[in-house]
C-alpha cells in the first residue's frame, strides 16, 4: 500500500495594482522630521542676537558688584532676555543631541533612554538657571 502524496495548496498570485508612489505613501516617516529641522534653524537664528546681547551685557557688567548685577537683571526687559536665552539654549542643545543620538545610536531602547535623559537634564538645568535669574532679579531695586 502506498501512501498518497501530501496535498500542496497553491496560493493564487496577487497582483498589486498600485503605483510606486501609492505603495510608498504611509510606509515611512516622510516629512516627520521637517518640524524638528525648522525648530533647530529658528532657535539657532534667535540665539544669535540673544548671544550677542548676552556678551554685551556681561562685558558691561565686568567688575560690577552683586547688587549692581541684580539691579540690571531686575529690569523686566533684561530678565526676559536672560530667560529667553536660557530657554532657547537648552531647547536648541537638546534638539541637537537628539539628532546625534538618532543618527548614531542604532539600538532603539538605548537611543530612547539617551534622548529622554537629555531632555530631562535640559529641563532641570534650564529651570534651575531660570530660577537663579528670577531670584537675582528679585534682589534688585
Image (spheres, rainbow, N blue to C red):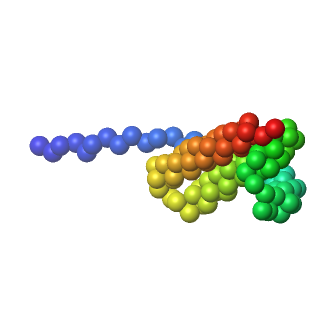
Q: Name the residue rendered at 17%, 43% in the picture.
A: 3
Is 71 displayed left or right of 123 in the figure? right
> x, y (%) of residue 86?
72, 48
- The quadrant holding residue 138 is top right
> x, y (%) of residue 8?
35, 43
> x, y (%) of residue 33?
71, 49
> x, y (%) of residue 60?
86, 60
**Camera-nearest residue between 95 and 111:** 95
- The count of marks equals 0
Q: Name the residue rendered at 85%, 40% in the picture.
A: 75
Quadrant location of the C terminus in the rendered image: top right
Is 97 displayed left or right of 45 in the figure? left
**Camera-nearest residue between 132 and 26:** 132
Residue 30 appears in view? no
**Camera-nearest residue between 132 and 12:** 132
Q: Name the residue rendered at 11%, 43% in the picture.
A: 1
- The quadrant holding residue 44 is bottom right
Residue 63 appears in view? yes
Is 80 displayed left or right of 92 in the figure? right
Q: Name the residue rendered at 61%, 60% in the picture.
A: 100
**Camera-nearest residue between 108 and 45:** 45
> In the image, is residue 105 above or below residue 80?
below
Amino acid at each position: 500500500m502506498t501512501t498518497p502524496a501530501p496535498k500542496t495548496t497553491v496560493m493564487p498570485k496577487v497582483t498589486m495594482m498600485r503605483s510606486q508612489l501609492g505603495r510608498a505613501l504611509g510606509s515611512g516617516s516622510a516629512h516627520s522630521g521637517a518640524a524638528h529641522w525648522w525648530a533647530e534653524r529658528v532657535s539657532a537664528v534667535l540665539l544669535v542676537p540673544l548671544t550677542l546681547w548676552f556678551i554685551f551685557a556681561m562685558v558691561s557688567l565686568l567688575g560690577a558688584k552683586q547688587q549692581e548685577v541684580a539691579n540690571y537683571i531686575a529690569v523686566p526687559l533684561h530678565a526676559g532676555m536672560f530667560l529667553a536665552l536660557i530657554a532657547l539654549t537648552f531647547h536648541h542643545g537638546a534638539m541637537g543631541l537628539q539628532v546625534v543620538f538618532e543618527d548614531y545610536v542604532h539600538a532603539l531602547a538605548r537611543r530612547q533612554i539617551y534622548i529622554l535623559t537629555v531632555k530631562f537634564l535640559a529641563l532641570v538645568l534650564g529651570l534651575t538657571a531660570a530660577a537663579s535669574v528670577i531670584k537675582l532679579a528679585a534682589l534688585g531695586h
